[in-house]
């Protein structure tokens, strides 16, 4: 009997991907074992984070890194670092950012619910561009000159949300920002795979990059990575670490925080609620090393095997078309799509409801059900669950025929 069964909590089959509301992915046994070992011993958290910084820097090409409690936490403490620098008084004031650099420039088409983490620091988002491309009203999006026009003496950072089709390019935005002496924060929470993206954003000019640890990396759900400039990582760390310390005795590793660069020792910072425990830090580092060791090709082959099984089951639903997307792209996540024809879009919702009524309940990607599309994502599936999903599709088809 599982720990959930003992508490009367039903488990599910997550074929929707590593969504937080569905508890994210399933970590490997090696990661769970590393976390269990970490939990049994005590360490100095600054020393542990300094070690993590070296590992992350080595795998991302950044100067330093930090393990956060998620990508959103990385955006929060990363933004705070850009607002305050290493100033203790400025850190103590947040989220009152008045009198500080308190504006963050962002493309209007890149606004999303997750930028609430940026706004938590007390900054104001300054939107640029017209999202004609996103709204279907035209082909243009924000352009570099619009970023340049929005940057002023109050600009703390430029916030850039990375996707495969983000415009303008990160390199163009970084060039404009750096010409004005302004750092660029990249939200790359879900931009793995491809594995090359671990280094891509730093190489293209990002000053800070936030990744989720609980998605494709396969780390603990409450983990993430912030990597980038050494001074900004130090400022972010100072606003997250437990600072209830004896000033004369506090001696963090200089490779993480250089005490000689500080004008004072800050108190608990705005990022204190975002702490990552020793278990999450060790789990994330273990998962990250396993992710890199496996490589895109082997990972894609493993995911594609599950998606092929699911697609075979979906093919039994004769009233819809089954398509595998990303099957030839080893730098992507392959998915199976069930596409109901025009006039039958409501069948998508009926299928989703049938899956949820199964025991265990099966969750699929439902965001495009109004267009008659249901997608299946393999990243959070456990061994054998693809077959269960396929059988559920066949059962739905049989019921429709009857």
Image (spheres, rainbow, N blue to C red):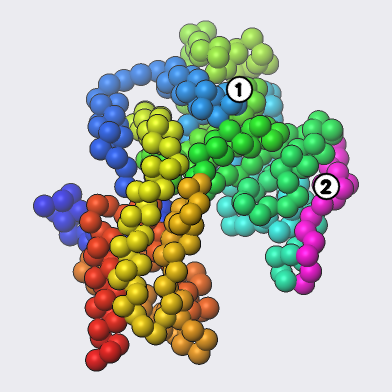
Query: Of 275 and 138, which appears nearest the observer?
Result: 138
Residue 38 seen from this side: yes
Whole-number angstrom distance, CA of label 1 to CA of label 2: 26 Å
The answer to whether the residues at label 1 and label 2 have Cβ atoms under 8 Å apart is no
Query: Of 367 and 154, which appears nearest the observer?
Result: 367
Q: Secondary structure at mark 2?
A: helix
Asked if residue 45 lies in the magenta stretch, the reply is: no
Residue 170, compared with residue 39, is above or below; it is: below
Q: Secondary structure at mark 1?
A: loop
Give the residue at x 35% y 19%.
Answer: 43
* Position of residue 370 measured from the top left corner of the image (x, y, whole percent): 51, 79
Give the residue at x 74% y 39%.
Answer: 171
Q: Which residues are magenta?
A: 137-155
Residue 289, compared with residue 349, is above or below; it is: above
Query: Residue 144 has which mark?
Result: 2
Query: Residue 63 has which mark?
Result: 1
Residue lying furthest front = 328
Q: Which quarter of the figure has residue 89?
A: top right
Query: Of 237 and 91, which appears nearest the observer?
Result: 237
* Position of residue 248 measured from the top left corner of the image (x, y, whole percent): 52, 8
Callout 2: few (<14), some (14-19), or many (20+) C-alpha neighbours within 10 Å? some
């Amino acid at each position: 009997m599982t720990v959930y069964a003992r508490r009367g909590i039903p488990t599910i089959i997550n074929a929707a991907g590593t969504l937080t509301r569905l508890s994210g992915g399933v970590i490997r046994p090696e990661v769970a074992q590393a976390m269990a070992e970490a939990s049994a011993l005590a360490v100095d958290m600054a020393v542990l984070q300094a070690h993590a910084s070296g590992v992350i820097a080595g795998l991302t090409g950044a100067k330093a890194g930090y393990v956060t409690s998620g990508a959103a936490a990385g955006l929060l403490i990363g933004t705070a670092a850009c607002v305050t620098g290493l100033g203790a008084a400025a850190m103590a004031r947040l989220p009152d950012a008045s009198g500080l650099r308190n504006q963050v420039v962002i493309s209007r088409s890149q606004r999303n619910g997750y930028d609430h983490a940026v706004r938590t620091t007390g900054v104001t988002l300054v939107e640029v561009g017209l999202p004609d491309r996103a709204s279907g009203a035209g082909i243009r999006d924000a352009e570099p000159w619009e970023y340049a026009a929005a940057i002023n003496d109050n600009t703390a950072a430029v916030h850039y949300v990375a996707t495969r089709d983000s415009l303008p390019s990160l390199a163009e935005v970084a060039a404009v920002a750096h010409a004005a002496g302004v750092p660029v924060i990249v939200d790359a929470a879900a931009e793995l795979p491809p594995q090359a993206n671990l280094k891509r954003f730093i190489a293209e000019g990002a000053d800070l990059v936030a990744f989720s640890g609980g998605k494709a990396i396969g780390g603990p759900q409450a983990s993430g990575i912030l990597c980038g400039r050494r001074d900004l990582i130090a400022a972010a760390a100072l606003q997250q670490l437990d600072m209830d310390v004896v000033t004369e005795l506090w001696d963090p590793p200089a490779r993480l925080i250089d005490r000689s660069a500080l004008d004072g020792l800050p108190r608990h910072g705005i990022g204190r609620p975002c702490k990552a425990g020793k278990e999450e830090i060790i789990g994330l580092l273990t998962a990250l090393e396993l992710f890199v060791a496996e490589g895109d090709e082997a990972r894609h082959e493993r995911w594609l095997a599950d998606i092929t099984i699911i697609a075979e089951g979906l093919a039994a639903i004769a009233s819809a078309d089954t398509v595998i997307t990303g099957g030839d792209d080893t730098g992507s996540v392959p998915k199976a799509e069930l596409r109901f024809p025009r006039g039958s879009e409501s069948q998508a919702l009926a299928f989703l409801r049938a899956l949820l009524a199964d025991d265990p309940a099966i969750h699929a990607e439902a965001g495009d059900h109004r267009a008659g599309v249901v997608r299946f994502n393999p990243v959070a599936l456990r061994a054998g669950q693809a077959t269960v999903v396929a059988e559920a599709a066949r059962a739905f088809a049989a019921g429709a025929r009857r």
